[in-house]
Image (cartoon, grey):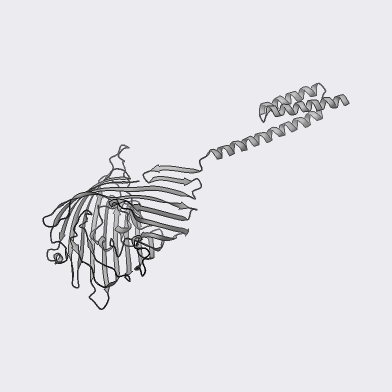
């Protein structure tokens, strides 16, 4: 009995060592079972002992296999990238695998040339980098958005967008920082996706130091399947931040799209923007003849003394019908003044239409009430010819009222756009600018002269 127990312990030790050396593999377990059978057949171990040891070996094998599979799974998960990196026509995007975080870097370059055919005015033909912007934007914890965009054109840096947005109460959002004031369809649509090289003449009511397309403020927005509502309170721009008694304003915009399909859109919108001038503004209205390089403004009110408030009222109408699109806006500026001085009202409007010769449609964002990127059906570099678009626009502005002789101007524009890719555009515009010869604009520095203007642009957005 002692001899048998001694042999049993010896063989168990051997079995244990064999198991350790064999490792958690099916081959090692099979060899161990063969050894146990030999021991049983020689009478070293009984049948009961054989069953106990065999079951233990099989259980060890199953446990080892499970551990091995778990290890493989953990290795596979560890080997997976914790972020997804993508580069495309929208720039460089890095996103966490769970979608909770996203970071995008992009920008734009717009290189322009303007040529003026004039007799008296000195508009100054030439070329420029119209915009050179870099942006960083993204999402944190799914509900926080942010954006920083800086323009480096004209040899200086200027903050365009710098804000944070809270989306935790969808569809309501709260945007705090330097951002666009919600007014005007052409203003809310990025300069990247305009039909023409410059916005229409009425943009002079917004692109103004005392009013401003962008301002520091808080905007609250919401939207439905075919409508948007935005409203906010706005102070000064970034250049004027920190001044005491700064001017302030409130603005609101509503849009409705009774038809909002991929290739068919009907858009109606309205907006109001009130500015209170407590900080002694030098309010004046003027605009270049829809060509940015122009050194002379053909219409100009000059400074409006003792202006203390302003109300802008705007209406929008636009449609997309297959390859055809059209858009029009009216904008009215009502100036309030102190001490009972005459209060002028100025206004203007435009109408434009375009057609894609290659079958594309203008891209409408119904949840923002604006237009976005054109996607060519055939991309240059991938066997396609890009998207070719022709367009026409009439725009007018009237800066004469109640003793102010800023002049009137009518512009006629014909344009050709080649959207080579979703990011690359080449454009040519012809503009006929006609200040009203009956106005007295010359008394305030305006020009009574019809001008032929030719503009070119190369653009890349990334």
Q: Is residue 76 above or below residue 401?
A: above
List the single residue furthest toward the right.
1
Image quadrant holding the N terminus, namely top right
Residue nearer the viewer, 349 or 302? 302
How many circles with numbers are drawn on the protein? Answer: 0
Residue nearer the viewer, 98 or 260? 98
**Residue displayed at 18% across by 58% down:** 296
Q: Is residue 46 visible?
A: no
List the single residue furthest toward the left.
119
Q: Is residue 376 above or below residue 314?
A: above
> Which image quadrant for residue 158?
bottom left
The percent position of residue 344, horizontal first and vertical second, equals 23, 72
List the single residue furthest toward the top.
42
The percent position of residue 383, horizontal first and vertical second, equals 30, 37
Q: Is residue 325 visible?
A: yes
Q: Is residue 2 above or below residue 157?
A: above
**Residue displayed at 13% across by 54% down:** 118
The percent position of residue 98, horizontal first and vertical second, equals 51, 47
Q: Is residue 70 left or right of residue 396?
A: right
> Which image quadrant for residue 388?
top left
Residue nearer the viewer, 221 or 210? 210
The percent position of residue 106, horizontal first and vertical second, equals 37, 47
Residue nearer the viewer, 4 or 450? 450
Q: Is residue 32 above or below residue 390?
A: above
């Amino acid at each position: 009995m002692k001899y048998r127990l001694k042999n049993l312990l010896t063989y168990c030790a051997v079995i244990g060592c064999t198991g350790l050396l064999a490792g958690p593999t099916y081959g090692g377990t099979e060899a161990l079972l063969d050894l146990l059978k030999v021991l049983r057949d020689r009478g070293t171990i009984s049948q009961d002992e054989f069953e106990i040891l065999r079951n233990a070996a099989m259980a060890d094998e199953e446990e080892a296999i499970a551990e091995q599979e778990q290890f493989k799974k953990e290795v596979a998960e560890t080997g997976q990238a914790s972020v997804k990196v993508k580069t495309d026509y929208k720039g460089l995007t890095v996103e966490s695998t769970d979608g909770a975080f996203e970071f995008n870097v992009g920008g734009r370059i717009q290189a322009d040339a303007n040529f003026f055919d004039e007799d008296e005015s000195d508009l100054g033909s030439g070329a420029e980098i119209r915009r050179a912007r870099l942006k960083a934007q993204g999402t944190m914890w799914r509900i926080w958005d942010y954006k920083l965009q800086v323009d480096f054109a004209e040899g200086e840096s200027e903050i365009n967008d710098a804000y944070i947005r809270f989306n935790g109460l969808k569809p309501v959002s709260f945007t705090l920082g330097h951002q666009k004031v919600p007014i005007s369809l052409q203003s809310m649509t990025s300069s990247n996706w305009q039909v023409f090289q410059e916005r229409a003449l009425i943009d002079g009511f917004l692109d103004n130091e005392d009013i401003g397309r962008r301002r520091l403020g808080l905007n609250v927005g919401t939207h439905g399947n075919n409508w948007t509502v935005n409203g906010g309170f706005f102070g000064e721009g970034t250049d004027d931040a920190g001044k005491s008694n700064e001017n302030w304003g409130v603005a609101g915009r509503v849009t409705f799209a009774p038809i909002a399909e991929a290739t068919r859109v009907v858009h109606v919108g309205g907006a109001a923007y009130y500015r209170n001038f407590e900080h002694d503004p030098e309010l004046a209205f003027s605009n270049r003849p829809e060509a940015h390089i122009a050194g002379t403004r053909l219409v100009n009110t000059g400074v409006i003394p003792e202006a203390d408030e302003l109300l802008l009222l705007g209406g929008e109408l636009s449609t997309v019908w297959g390859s055809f699109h059209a858009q029009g806006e009216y904008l009215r500026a009502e100036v309030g003044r102190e001490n009972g001085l005459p209060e002028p009202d100025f206004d203007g409007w435009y109408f434009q239409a375009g057609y894609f010769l290659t079958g594309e449609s203008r891209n409408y964002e119904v949840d923002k009430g604006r237009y976005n990127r054109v996607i060519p059906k055939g991309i240059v570099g991938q066997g396609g010819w890009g998207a070719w678009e022709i367009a026409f626009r009439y725009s007018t502005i009237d800066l004469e009222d109640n003793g102010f002789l800023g002049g009137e101007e009518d512009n006629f524009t014909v344009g050709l756009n080649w959207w080579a890719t979703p990011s690359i555009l080449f454009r040519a515009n012809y503009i006929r600018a006609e200040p009203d010869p009956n106005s007295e604009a010359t008394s305030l520095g305006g020009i009574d002269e019809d001008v032929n203007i030719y503009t070119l642009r190369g653009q890349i957005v990334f």
